[in-house]
Structures are given as structure tokens and as C-alpha cells.
Amino acid sequence: MATVRDTSTPRPPAGRFDLAVVGAGIVGLATALAGARRRLRIVVIDRDASANGASVRNFGFVTVTGQAAGAMWARARRSHDVWREVAAAAGIPIVQTGVWMTARRAESVAVLESFMQTDMAAGCSLLTAAEARRRCPPLAAPDLLAVLESTIELRVESREAVPQLAAWLAGAHGVAFMRATAVTAIDPPRLETSRGLVEADRVAVCPGDDYRGLYPERLAAYALTRCKLQMLRLADPGFTLPGTLMSDLGLGRYPGFTALPAAAALKARLAAEQPEQVRHGVHLIVAQSADGSLVAGDSHQYAPIPDPHRSREVDDLILDEFRAALGIEPPPAIDRWIGTYASADDRPVLIDAPESSVRIAIVTSGSGASTAFAIGEEVIASLFGPEPTGPLRRRPPTGRRRQT
């Protein structure tokens, strides 16, 4: 893992900020970036010493194909473009591009064919099983019928990309960071923190799945819960995947597919043939890292306080789908972990205005890596008014001393 210099301040920086962002996960950093485009003076405050929540426990998979039609799909397209730009500027490696969605059932093929008739299929093509095997010989599933190939997706290593993004915001745009600092109260322009008072004209609260810290009464009205997921890292299989790989189970979960009329028959068949995977919310994503290892997952367990323990049964269900989709034995597991993220039944994103100068922003659908940059722009537009999107701009010197 890359070493990123700690750019946090030991005490509140002097002066008043244009914007305080509470939370340094991907939504908070994306909001800070959108503010940096406008040359705002920004401080990011986070209760943890370094990123360790949902933003660094996921695939780093920036997914466009399969996002819900409309606003979420548009957010994913915009965020994809910003990821490309930021990765180049911040030196964040893009370790994989594209996605292959494999289909082993006639009902799955029908969903893919239906998807190809939508506007969301831009950049996608439908491969026959023979074409897919010719391009990726290790794809040996005997019942493979077709593959949807998308060239749009990209993947970064979350555990490295998120701290690199923060370091770049500090170094290139003068964003101040206060780590290991709790915000205990907000009364604009005053923020009370565990390290003293911070002043900011506007505040963006990006709390992840912390619903009881700030504005708990506002968040309680949304009936939020948490989703627990399980993931594994598998040893290098000795071959290179042509893109991140997904399977029939994903076609039964991603809203861009499940909203299609053809998906009803597939969901019924999956429920009959793979009831345990469906019950545990298992769908397959297999992403390949720069060292050749595979990140595989994941599962979905919903509860206000999910069980903190791993389930061997769930790991086995993920690996069973790996065997079925690729037609080979999975390599040995070399790492296993769990994560949690915010979830809501009625919305993929929550943006709330408890006060005229404060916004709360939470991704409630597990798609933060895929949509956060667009959401950050929406939050900044809501707080500061709309502004046409332009290229990234380096903040000019302010004359203030940067504390490190």
C-alpha cells in the first residue's frame, strides 16, 4: 500500500472558512473537491485518524452499467469522468477498466438484450460465449451463454486512492484537514470540535453511517439502517481478467437491470435455484488488482446494528458463485474483511437541509465510489448556487501558513 503523508492539523487552523466538510470519506472528499473548483477556503474534519470506513472497504469499482436509470446513472457518468481527471492529477493508478457481466441462463440473456435497447447501453456490447472464451480463455463455465461487455467502468484501490485523494486536495488545493477530531455541535458559523472552535460560513455533513452524532432528529425521520458486506482477496490466479467480472446474481440486484420488465423472470428463477445467495444478498464481483490478486464479494445483510462477525457460510456462497461463473476453482483466500454502509429503502442518496447554510449528504445505496463526485457537486451547488463545471483549478496562494 502506498504511504501517504499525514496532512492534518494539530489544532484548528486560524481564520474563517468558506466551507467546513464534516467527514473525510469519499462523499466528504468529493464535496471538498467541488468546493476547491470554486477556490473556496475549505477545512475537512474527521473523527478518525485515517480513513477506515466504507470508502476504503469496498471494491473501488466505479460502476456506471447497472445504475438506476435517470439521476443515478447520470451521477455515475459524471463521477466516472471526474475520477479519470482526478486520478491523472493526483497520481492515483487506475488498476482495471471495463466490466464483463456473464449470463448463464436464458432469462439473463433476455435481460441483457433488453438493456442493450436502452440509452444506458452506450459503450456496451453483447458477446457470444464463443467470443468471450476466445478473448478470455480462463472463462470456462460450461453453461455460459453471453457476456455484456462495458468499456466505461474503472477501478482504483480504495485503501490507497482515498488517502491519496485527501493528500492531493491538501497539497494542490490548500484544503485543511483536521483528523482525529470530533464535531460535537454546529451553530453556523460556529462548529464546536474536540480540538476547539472552527468557523465556517457553510457546512456539509457527510457522516457515512453515523446517524446519532450530528442532527440525529433529522436523520431519524429517514428510517436509515446499515448494510453489512463480506469480501475476500484471493491469490493471483495466474491470468488477467479483461475487466471486472459479474454474474447472473448481479443482474438480479442492480436497479438498472432489475427495473427492466425482462428481469422479473430472472429474479424468480434465481430465487428458486439459489435461495441462499438471494437470502444473504450475495452477488458476484471479481476485480483484479495490480499485483494480480482478486478482490471478490460480496453480500448484503441489513440491520440497524449488523452482527460484527464474519460468516463462513456467506464466504462459501460467494466462492460457489465464483466457481459457477468462471468454471474454475477459486484461488486461496489471502484476506477477508467486512464493511458497513448506510442504507435506505426509499432512496439511493439523501441530501437534507437542516439549516439554510448546512447540508447533510449520505449515499444510501452502496454506490459512493460510483456517484460521490457528482453528489459533491450537487451539495456545493445547493450551498453556493450553481456554477458551470470547468477543469480542475489549482488554488492560488492565500498568504496563510499551511500547517502539516
Image (cartoon, rainbow, N blue to C red):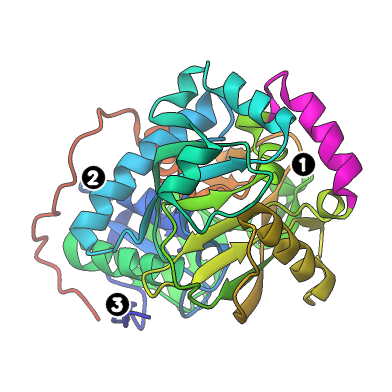
Q: Mark 1 highlights which residue?
A: 221
For residue 303, which numbered disc appears in the image? none
How many numbered discs, if any? 3
**How far is disc 1 from disc 3 in space, using C-alphas?**
36 Å
Q: Secondary structure at mark 1?
A: loop
Q: Mark 3 highlights which residue?
A: 7
**Residue found at x 71% / y 66%:** 319
Q: Of callouts 1 and 3, which one flags the residue occurring earlier in the amino acid sequence?
A: 3
Q: Which residues are magenta?
A: 258-275
Number of other residues with Cα within 10 Å of mark 2, as a class: few under 14, some 14 to 19, many 20 or more: some
Q: Of callouts 3 and 2, which one flags the residue occurring earlier in the amino acid sequence?
A: 3
For residue 37, which numbered disc appears in the image? 2
Q: Amino acid at mark 2?
A: Arg
Which image quadrant: the C terminus?
A: bottom left
Q: Of callouts 1 and 2, which one flags the residue occurring earlier in the amino acid sequence?
A: 2
Q: Is residue 350 above or below residue 33?
A: above
**How far is disc 3 from disc 2 in space, using C-alphas?**
20 Å
Q: Is residue 116 magenta?
A: no
